Image (cartoon, helix red, strand yellow):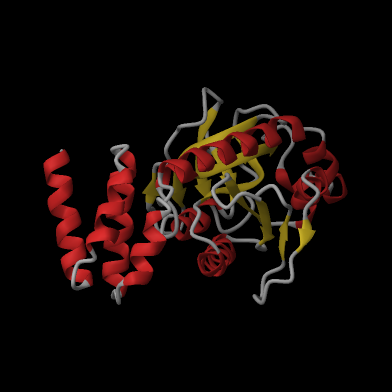
Amino acid sequence: MNELSGRVNIVVAHRLEAQPLIDYFELRPDDSPVSLTIYKNDTGISLVICGMGAQAAGLATAELGEYQSRETESVAGWLNFGIAGHKTAAIGSGLVANRITDQQSGRTVYPSMLLGTRASSPVLTVGEPEVNYPEDLAYEMEAFGFWSAASMIAGLDLIQVYKLISDNPANPANEIDLGTISEFVSSHMGQVSQFIVELQALSAEHNDAHQLPTEYGHLSDSFHLSVTQHLQLKRLCQRFRALDMEDLLAEFSNSMPSSGRHLLDAMESRLETLC
């Protein structure tokens, strides 16, 4: 996989929900040295099965993000996928979360809605399966925990929650035959996979826009920089690239400032003349 191509990390609560995605995208267990089993393919899609509940989803998301941060600098899209109940939505509907509320704390967050004109719904993360559906929204158990952890890793535009409606007042959650969940998800993989592909494309656009110029590596290796200075150098190089002026970075390699601090100051001054 190209380092700067799009990536998507999918967090799913149950194996029954995950298996159709594992099969469809031909995901294989990775030998990563973490407590999670990470399923992945060569096209940039990774999946973890987090277990039930917001806390489990948050912990799995954080662990996957921390592990990947040591492996790559490219940014992934993050998706929490799973089944959910809804008061009015038809079974089989795919809904994007436009608001996520944690029932226990009352906290609410608002995801970005950047992936087309799909149907959306508020989502309520509950501690126990809901069988009465008192409000006109989607009921599930992982989204808020997932979002809270993912928002510490990626930009909000790349964090999405997509729920497949499996139950409603006419067909309540306590009557779902668990043995049919994988078949149910499989029957709707067309719409699910399209959403994943679009999120992957969004990740690719982000990584391309933030690609580091080749001169960054030479400058980074030429000076002893602190962690903070490395981050400053990255941002400055990205700004030169965004201005389509990355060829000017060679000036700093050729002039060889006396220190990393002088390098960063010189780059800042040069940008001021360009803006």
Compared to residue 273, the image places residue 106 above or below, namely below
Decide if residue 84 is on the left or right side of residue 254: right
Residue 222, by quadrant, is: bottom left
133 vs 204, nearest the viewer: 204
Residue 46, by quadrant, is: bottom right
Image quarter (top left, top right, bottom left or bottom right) of the C terminus: top left
Decide if residue 101 is on the left or right side of residue 41: left
The residue positioned 53% from the left and 63% from the top of the image is: 65
Q: Position of residue 256 (x, y in %)?
A: 24, 65
Task: Residue at the far front: name it.
Answer: 254
- The reply to whether residue 167 is visible in this rendering is no
Decide if residue 237 is on the left or right side of residue 135: left
Numbered marks: total: 0
Compared to residue 54, the image places residue 36 above or below, namely below
235 vs 90, nearest the viewer: 235
Q: Position of residue 199 (x, y in %)?
A: 56, 39
Residue 15, by quadrant, is: bottom right
The residue positioned 72% from the left and 67% from the top of the image is: 37
- The reply to whether residue 126 is visible in this rendering is yes
The residue positioned 85% from the left and 41% from the top of the image is: 183
The residue positioned 59% from the left and 41% from the top of the image is: 200
Q: Position of residue 80 (x, y in %)?
A: 59, 49
Decide if residue 254 is on the left or right side of residue 185: left
Task: Residue at the far top: name it.
Answer: 117
Compared to residue 260, the image places residue 113 above or below, namely above
Q: Position of residue 9 (x, y in %)?
A: 60, 53
